[in-house]
Each structure stands twice: as C-alpha cells, then as structure tokens.
Amino acid sequence: MSSPRTKRRGLLSFAVLLPMAGLIPVGEASAAEPDGGSPSAPGKPTVVLVHGAWADASGWNEVSERLQNEGYPVVTTANPLRSLSGDSAYLAARLKAIEGPIVLVGHSYGGSVITNAAVGNPNVKSLVYIAALQPDVGESVLQLATKYPGSRLSDDPDASVPTALNAVPIPGQGDPAKDVELYIKPEKFSEVFLSDRLDSSIAEVLAAAQRSATPAAFGEPSKKPAWKTLPSWALVATEDYTIGTENLRFMAKRAGSHVVEVDAPHAVHLTDPGAVTDLIRRAAQPESGTATPSLAETGSWERTAALGGVSGLAIAGGIAMVALSRRVRPSRR
C-alpha cells in the first residue's frame, strides 16, 4: 500500500500534468501545418484583380506575385475599357467560370466594374477598392471624380474633354465627338497618375503603354451596387490626383468599407504593392482583424471551443487536486 506522502506526490504530479492536456491538439484540426504555417491553396479564395483606365493587367504583377507566394490563386483579368455595362458583363462572365469563393479587387475605374459585375454572384465574398470608384445607382465616373476638388484630370470644368486627356477619333465611327479614345497626355501622366512618385524614365514607359478608355466608360450610369450587400475594403490614396482623395473618402465612407489610408498616388498598386497586398489579405481573411494570433492559428471555432473547455477543466481540476493533496497528512509514527 502506498504511503500518504506517495499519494500526495502522485496527486501533485497529476495536477501539474492535467493543465497540459489543454495543449494537446483536438480532433482532425490538430494536423500539422506545412512549413511556414501557410494553409494550402485549396483553402484560400481566388483573388481576381481588375485594372482601370490608362493601365493594363501587368500593373498588378508585384501584387499578384506576393499573393501567389502566399498560396492564393490569382486571376488578373483584362478590362476592355469600352463601356461600363459592357465591361461589367465581360467581367461577370469571367467570374462565373471561377469555382469557389472569390475576393474581387478593382483599381480606379475597375472599382465601378466590380461594383456592377459582382451582383448576383454568390461566389464573390468580398470587394476591395484600391484607389477606386464605388458608384451608387445612376452615378457615373465623371460625376464622382468631380464631386469634390482633388482630381487633376482637368483644370477647366467647362471643357468638353478634360484638359489632361487627348481624344483620339476611332476610325469608321459615326460621331467624332463621342467615338474617341481617351488617353492621358504624356506630359501629364506622371503628375496625374503617379503624383510624380516614380522615376521619370519609368513614368514615360507607363505613359507609352497606357490603354485608353472611351467616353462611354466614364459617362454611363452605374446600376445596382454590390457593395450594398457585400463586405468591402477600401484603400484611400492620400495624394490621388486622378479621382481625388476626398472623393475616395466620400465613397468609402458611404459604402461602409473598412478603410486604410496610404500616403501614395492614384497608382498605389505600382508604388506600394505591399500595402495593397495587405489589404487584400485582410479581405480574404476578415476574421484575422479581430482574432488574437493564438486563436487565429487554431484552425476552426470548434477546435478553439474544445481547447477552451479542456483548458478550463484542466485549471479547475488542477486547483482541486492541489487542495485535496493538502488534506492528506502523513500519519504520526
């Protein structure tokens, strides 16, 4: 028969070991993560990146590479820049071909396109606006870009064509006043699009490669906005001379977006790809903004609840064992 002292040692050892049970993985969620702790791609949404006017899909290259390195499937789709309704229909068809959850990201005019294209698609889980337009029903790009001062697309509000733009007629079309391609003038590109934040040689290359948009893209009224039913995130560039910083703030606040402000130009995805990637990551994992690191790493709420229950029971059991051990007194010889 064991002595009272032996019993006390056994109880104390059990009291020490019992709380450690809370650290044992529970159920299937206990499987080890791969090296680096990043979940595999099948558990992550597809990020669809939509460019705006005077740019193309290559502008997303650095952001896309960062996301892919973290295991996100990425689609950088071409934006036709012909008309808001046509561009939105084009994107909507592209989205329907993607299986699983989608984080839809738009820059500049691309924000108007994602606002319309996401409506009715249950796979789109969140919207991300990168220095982008967030129109409501009936609003056009031109209306939103001129609501508050800040845009440098024109220094003459009465000009038929914004003074920073060149209007190049489209051959074979009927109305030379409307059927035109709109480009940013090369000498204005660095200021308007980049706020002179990039080296002049880089700005010149970007200006030469810019893709034009038509007046229909900027003047056509928007339809039902997806941001009224989907959670949204918005990056406001504080030195945006294309849409205007105050206009970005107005739209983001109205939409109830989660807002981040970055000291950057309109083309923030070119100058600050890290900040853009971070916001997309937040939209892809919205719970990470509120959960503590320890809880975020548990893998599921069921496992978190189980761990919490076991830990609580372990603490209570440990206290009880210690108290019980104190009552065991060695017999007097």
Image (cartoon, rainbow, N blue to C red):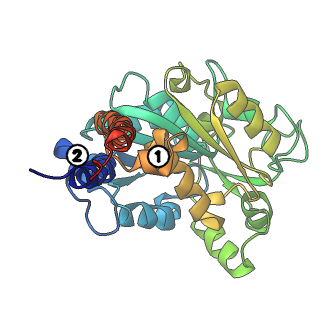
The outermost residue toward the front is: 333
In the orientation shown, which residue stands out farthest toward the left?
A: 1
Taking depth in this image into account, of 329 and 70 the one nearest to the observer is: 329
Give the percent coordinates (x, y) of residue 101: 32, 38
Disc 2 target residue: 29
For label 1, the crowd category at 10 Å Cα-Cα, with few meaning under 14, some 14 to 19 and many 20 or more, is many
Residue type highlighted by circle 2: Ala
Whether residue 185 is visible: yes
> Residue 224: x percent and y percent?
53, 18
In the displayed structure, would residue 302 be above or below residue 171? above
- Give whichever of 297, 107 is nearer the camera: 297
Does residue 263 sit above or below 92 in this rendering? below
The amino acid beneath tag 1 is: Pro
User: What's the residue at 81%, 35% (across, down)?
Assistant: 146
Classify mark 1: helix, strand or loop.
loop
Which residue position holds label 1? 80
Q: Secondary structure at mark 2?
A: helix
How many angstroms separate mark 2 from mark 1 (CA)?
Answer: 44 Å
Q: Nearer the viewer, residue 30 or 16?
A: 16
Tell me where residue 287 appears, x and y as whole percent: 47, 39
Q: Are marks 2 and 1 in contact (CB under 8 Å)?
A: no
The residue drawn where x is 36% and y is 53% is 75
Residue 83 showing in the rendered view: no
Q: Looking at the rendering, which quadrant does residue 252 occupy? A: top right
- Of the image marks 2 and 1, the number of the one nearer the N terminus: 2
Query: From what the image shows, is residue 220 above or below residue 243?
Result: above
Which residue lies at the image location 83% right of the left edge and 50% below the top edge? 152
- Of residue 41 and residue 163, the one placed in the foreground of this image is 41
Q: Position of residue 7 (x, y in %)?
A: 22, 49
Count of numbered labels shown in the rendering? 2
